[in-house]
Amino acid sequence: MESKISISNLNFFYGKAQALFDITLEIPERQVVAFIGPSGCGKSTFLRTLNRMNDTIPIADVSGTVEIDGENIYAPGTDVVALRRKVGMVFQKSNPFPKSIFDNVAYGIRINGIHNSKADLNERVEKALRDSALWEEVKDRLNTSALGLSGGQQQRLCIARALAVQPEVILMDEPASALDPIATQKIEELVVQLKRRYTIVIVTHNMQQAARVSDRTAFFMLGKLIEYNATQKMFTNPDEKLTEDYITGRFG
Amino acid sequence: MTALTSACAVFATVILLLIISYIAIQGITSLNFQFLIDTPKPVGEGGGIGNAIVGSAMMTALAVLIGLPVGIAAGVYLAEYGKNWFGNIVRFVADTLIGIPSIIIGIFIYTLVVMPMGRQSGLAGGLALAIIMLPIVARTTEEMIRLVPNSMREGALALGAPQWRVSWNIVLPAAASGIATGAMLAMARITGETAPLLFTALNSRFYNFYYDQPMSSLTVQIFNYATGPFEVEHAMAWAATLILVGIILMINILVRFLTRKKF
């Protein structure tokens, strides 16, 4: 299996406090990798190192390398804007812009100048909405406010917005944690659909969700990677005692 | 407790209504179309505030033209990039500037603009008003931008938007109605300023459409009419006050209408 992202010896600091310890991990192309672990274990922090979202925190400091397609994204002179276009992100709390549904999806296309005509823009927006299984629900009200959508629809809109800029990797930070079971199911189905074309990394608190959607699972605790294995193995016969304790609900 | 707070709310509203209705009663009698277009004349020959309305509009426009963009840009800087020592200095200076009595701003512009030019002018008046407006706009803009949730910035950054585009087409529009309210308050404030115009724009008895000449304004004209010895002048001061309050009220309503939430 071809490796899309390869992380080696990654350490992460918030000021003097170390949040991630010496993490080494390979993320294969067109698979879903789930990050699990108790709150505060660093899984979200780790996710955010993959598109350099932590750059917005002034006191953050990173050592080690994260290579995407063989290029270290922490090398000096890296184009962070281009990186984030390649590595899209969906957040825990849906965060649509206070604009129309259409303009939300079109935002990334417009700022990156991906489209070459108005018709092309419309086409791309429609495709992104279809790919996120939202088109049928919103096609008649593209010009109404995105804030009028339900929570689950808003989250799928955020996925559509990320898909519209044609990323290769999609990072999802607990994308369904604020949604009801039906909306969650839709997101999960979507994740399984999307992995045919994208490499997906998903942080989740929900163990069943990790088991349902992912091919591989990484278990974190206190900033350390405890175990990284095929999901099947992880949930039936983990190598580490700590993983087993966590998965069976003995702590966390 | 509810009774007490609502009583206070009623009190605050009643004060405004009392002021407006008193001004309306006093001012309405001398108000007519001729009054709105005439220039001041010797006592007994009528006269009006046409040139004062034009002067006020021109100087306010100049102040808004300078104070609004600079103030908003400064506010964006303070909120988005100003978490450092320089930002703290700017914030402190702006707060101090807001607290400085407006007549001192007038003296400042007198020394800086009027003395070198050799005469009072609409330009000097407009600049004085711009200086008063600037820190108010900057600070309200900053406050409003801080209210925009960080998740929205992250959403845009994650799509590959450079920082300046995030500020420009996500954060600013999201804060627009709040910023507009601040701008409106600042504009209403400068429209009602008298002291900074006394040294800078002085006054004029004629229509003046040139910024390099002394310029009349509603507030200074009201001051002149009100301090005159004759009853007719007092009546005209009331009428001019009614117009001034009406204009400020209209600015308020207009901006509220223009910035009502669309999304």
Image: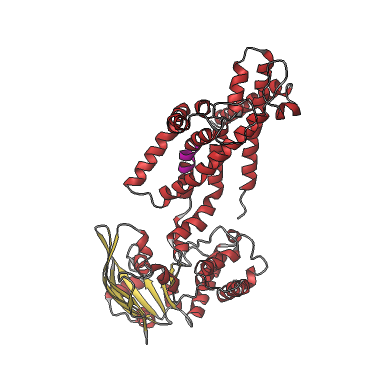
Please identify the dominant SS of the magenta region. Answer: helix
Q: Which one is nearer the viewer's eye here, A40 or A2?
A: A2
Instruction: Give percent across and percent down for residue B139.
Output: 45, 42
Is B260 in front, or is B119? B119
Where is residue A190? Give x, y as percent.
52, 76
Horizontal and vertical percent position of residue A120: 60, 75
Q: Nearer the viewer, residue B154 or B103?
A: B103
**Left or right side of B226 for B83:** left
B158 up-or-down from B246: above or below: below
Q: Is residue B226 magenta?
A: no
Residue lying at the far bottom of the rendered structure: A1
Question: Residue A22 lies in what quarter of the image?
Answer: bottom left
Residue depicted at 53% across the width and 39% down the height: B63
- Where is residue A69, by image quadrant? bottom left
Does the rendering let one see residue B10? no
Q: Quadrant of the C terminus of chain B?
A: bottom right
Residue A217 picture location, percent across and down: 37, 77
Q: How is the image coloured?
A: secondary structure
Q: Residue at x 39, y 52 (%)?
A: B81
Q: How many circles with numbers are drawn on the protein?
A: 0
- Residue stretch in magenta: B133-138
Q: Is residue B214 above or below residue B151?
A: above
Kindly tell me whether residue A115 is visible in this rendering. Answer: yes
